[in-house]
Image (spheres, rainbow, N blue to C red):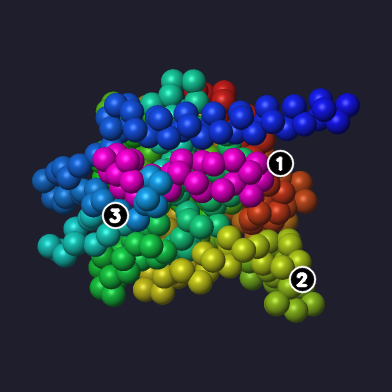
């Protein structure tokens, strides 16, 4: 029996090595090189480019020709596997001034998969960077996942000029990133403000046949910012102390999860929070245009401060192409409270529309 156990351990070790070798082989292959991008024009109004940032270990020196930073040993805390990750910088322009937007693309080898389309992830805030959403990589398997920090937070530049920020600018930055990385067929996921950004992107690209958004998830995303502020203030009144708001309606964990702490530490200050988008209210498309939108799942936690009335308005934006799902026992950050439930909910939805 002990001999069999040793053989089994040996076989598992060999399999791990084989998986790692295949990952490295792909990154050195022609398909990987085809993925890697170089400087190019995005629109007549602005330019975008990938600026390589070489920080690879000596072991990965042979991968440098793939462009960007290759961190092929990003350890998954849940599955103890190695997840290839391509990092780079998108350069955007505001009034002739260039700024950097940092991105991370996990599992780049699956970017063009027809069976499991990539997921483009939009963080909230505004200006709370994508660190708190990166646990999604461990939960949604086999898919490429694109994260980036919107201008003003995280690893991206933070202009002090407030005219560099707006929802419209954020949509243009997303368009530039997708074009530069040749992401043409994808699922769109937006958390909180990221859901607002996702909807505005879809509105502005509803007739763009160059890109195919297969489905969209709006997670804890309000359709009306004034309304969600009113709901949050109402919920606070029921608490013994305003300090209880975080662990009741924001994230129901005893300690603040590390990814969320990291995101808050790296958050921006110039264009931040609901005050930056206080007047936002989603406006529906025409019925004909609405029929061109992808299927949508509106996701929220049972105890979320983004309450049912705060998401009901999305029904008027998507019509019959919408469904609602409530995560029992969760609040605003269901991903960090019940990762397994959250991941299963997303993956089952995405799989319907691949």
In the image as oriented, which residue stretches furthest toward the right? 1
In percent of the image, x 51 and y 57: which residue is there?
Answer: 131
What span is in magenta? 61-86
Please name which of the two marks, 1 or 3, marks the residue nearer to the observer. Answer: 3
Query: Which circle, 2 or 3, is nearer the viewer?
Result: 3
The answer to if 331 sits in the magenta stretch is no
In the image, 127 versus 273, the foreground residue is 127
Give me the C-alpha separation between circle 1 and circle 2: 28 Å
Q: Earlier in the sequence, mark 2 or mark 3?
A: 3
Identify the residue shown where x is 33% and y is 28%: 29
Helix, strand or loop at disc 3? loop
Image coordinates for residue 184, horizontal then vertical, percent: 33, 30
Mark 2 vs mark 3, CA separation in Å: 50 Å
The reply to whether residue 282 is in sight is: no
Residue 192 spot, x, y in % from top left: 53, 54
Residue 205: x, y in percent? 31, 36
Residue at 19 percent across and 62 percent down: it is 98
Residue annotated with mark 1? 341
Q: Earlier in the sequence, mark 1 or mark 2?
A: 2
Please tell me which residue is depicted at 47% across the width and 29% down the height of the picture. 22
How many other residues sit within 10 Å of disc 1, few (<14), some (14-19) or many (≥20)? some
Q: Is residue 158 left or right of residue 296?
A: left
Count of numbered circles in the view: 3
Residue behind mark 3 = 53
The residue that disc 2 covers is 238
């Amino acid at each position: 029996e002990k001999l069999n156990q040793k053989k089994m351990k040996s076989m598992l070790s060999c399999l791990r090595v084989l998986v790692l070798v295949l990952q490295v082989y792909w990154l050195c292959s022609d398909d990987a090189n085809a993925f890697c991008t170089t400087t190019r024009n995005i629109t007549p109004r602005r330019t975008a480019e990938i600026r390589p940032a070489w920080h690879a270990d000596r072991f990965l020196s042979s991968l440098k020709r793939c462009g960007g930073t290759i961190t092929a040993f990003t350890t998954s805390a849940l599955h103890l596997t190695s997840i290839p990750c391509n990092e780079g910088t998108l350069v955007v322009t505001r009034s002739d001034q260039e700024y950097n937007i940092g991105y991370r693309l996990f599992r780049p080898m699956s970017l063009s998969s027809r069976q499991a389309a990539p997921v483009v992830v939009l963080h909230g805030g505004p200006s709370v960077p994508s660190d708190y959403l990166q646990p999604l990589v461990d939960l949604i398997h086999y898919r490429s996942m694109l994260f980036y920090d919107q201008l003003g937070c995280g690893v991206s530049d933070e202009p002090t000029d407030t005219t560099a920020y707006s929802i419209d600018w954020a949509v243009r930055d997303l368009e530039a990133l997708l074009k530069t990385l040749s992401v043409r067929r994808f699922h769109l996921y937006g958390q909180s403000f990221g859901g607002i950004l996702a909807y505005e992107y879809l509105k502005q690209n509803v007739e763009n046949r160059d890109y195919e958004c297969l489905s969209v998830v709006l997670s804890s995303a309000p359709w009306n910012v004034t309304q969600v502020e009113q709901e949050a203030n109402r919920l606070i009144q029921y608490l013994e102390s305003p300090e209880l708001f975080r662990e009741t309606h924001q994230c129901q964990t005893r300690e603040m999860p590390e990814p969320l702490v990291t995101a808050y530490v790296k958050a921006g200050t110039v264009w931040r929070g609901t005050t930056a988008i206080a007047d936002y209210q989603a406006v529906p498309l025409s019925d004909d245009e609405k029929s061109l939108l992808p299927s949508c799942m509106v996701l929220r936690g049972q105890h979320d401060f983004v309450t049912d009335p705060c998401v009901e308005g999305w029904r008027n934006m998507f019509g019959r192409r919408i469904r609602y799902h409530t995560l029992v026992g969760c609040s605003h950050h269901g991903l960090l409270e019940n990762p397994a439930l959250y991941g299963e909910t997303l993956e089952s939805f995405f799989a319907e529309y691949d």
